[in-house]
Image: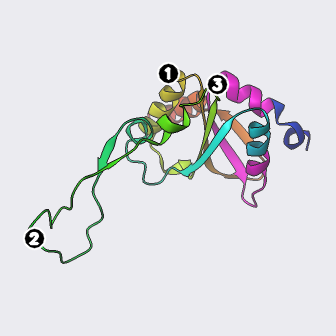
């Protein structure tokens, strides 16, 4: 239990690697303890789901357009079939406006492809104040690894 009491090893690994893949016990609790330790260390934290991100880097850092879902029969007069494109503000720019470092905690990261994981990892390398933790599934005990090693292992399995 000393890991959950201090979180020093997790904090040190997050600082050195920038992007971590984490496997958490399914009963929960350890994530909130780690988030609380990170907030106490001076980080801002943001929790969001990896589902529906699309292109993660564009979604997180750039102004982008989305179309509303198609709701069946609509007037075909003005943009009826497709819907109007709505501009969405990027999530991270406002959070990175302050000088505080930011931890983005992505839930359900197992739905992301290797290329999406690689682009998220590269985003952490470009912005030193940004740290990302991606939950990659459940485990009997709390364990994590650098995203680089997970991506390398995944690309070797695909060969």
Mark linked to residue 126: 1
Q: Position of residue 110 (x, y in %)?
A: 54, 49
- Residue 158 appears in the figure: no
In the depicted view, which residue is nearer to us: 53 or 21?
53
Magenta-drawn segment: 9-33
Q: Secondary structure at mark 1?
A: helix
Q: Position of residue 125 (x, y in %)?
A: 53, 22
Give the Cα distance between marks 3 and 1: 12 Å
Q: Residues within 10 Å of mark 1 (few under 14, many from 20)?
A: few
Location of mark 2 (residue): 76
Q: Residues within 10 Å of mark 2 (few under 14, many from 20)?
A: few
Give the Cα distance between marks 2 and 1: 44 Å
* 3 or 1: tag closer to the N-terminus: 3
In the depicted view, which residue is nearer to us: 158 or 20?
20
Q: Secondary structure at mark 2?
A: loop
Residue 149 highlighted magenta (yes or no): no
Mark linked to residue 17: 3
- Residue 94 appears in the figure: yes
Q: Can you say which quadrant of the picture contains the N terminus?
A: top right
The residue shown at (13%, 74%) is 75
Q: Can you say which quadrant of the picture contains the C terminus?
A: top left
Q: Quadrant of residue 15?
A: top right
Left or right: 121, with 52 as reference point: right
Q: Nearer the viewer, mark 2 or mark 1?
A: 2
The residue shown at (74%, 41%) is 143
Q: Position of residue 126 (x, y in %)?
A: 49, 21
For the residues labelled 2 and 1, say whether their Cβ atoms are less than 8 Å apart: no
């Amino acid at each position: 239990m000393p890991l959950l009491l201090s979180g020093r090893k997790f904090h040190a690994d997050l600082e050195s690697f920038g992007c971590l893949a984490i496997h958490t016990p399914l009963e929960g609790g350890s994530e909130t303890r780690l988030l609380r330790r990170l907030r106490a260390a001076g980080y801002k934290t943001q929790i969001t789901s990896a589902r529906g991100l699309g292109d993660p880097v564009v979604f997180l850092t750039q102004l982008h357009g989305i179309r509303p879902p198609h709701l069946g029969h609509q007037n075909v007069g003005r943009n009826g079939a497709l819907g109007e494109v709505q501009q969405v503000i990027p999530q991270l720019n406002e959070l990175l406006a302050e000088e505080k470092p930011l931890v983005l905690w992505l839930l359900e990261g197992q739905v992301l492809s290797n290329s999406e994981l690689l682009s998220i990892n590269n985003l952490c390398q470009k912005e030193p104040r940004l740290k990302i933790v991606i939950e990659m599934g459940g485990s009997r005990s709390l364990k994590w690894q650098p995203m680089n090693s997970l991506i390398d292992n995944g690309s070797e399995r695909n060969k």
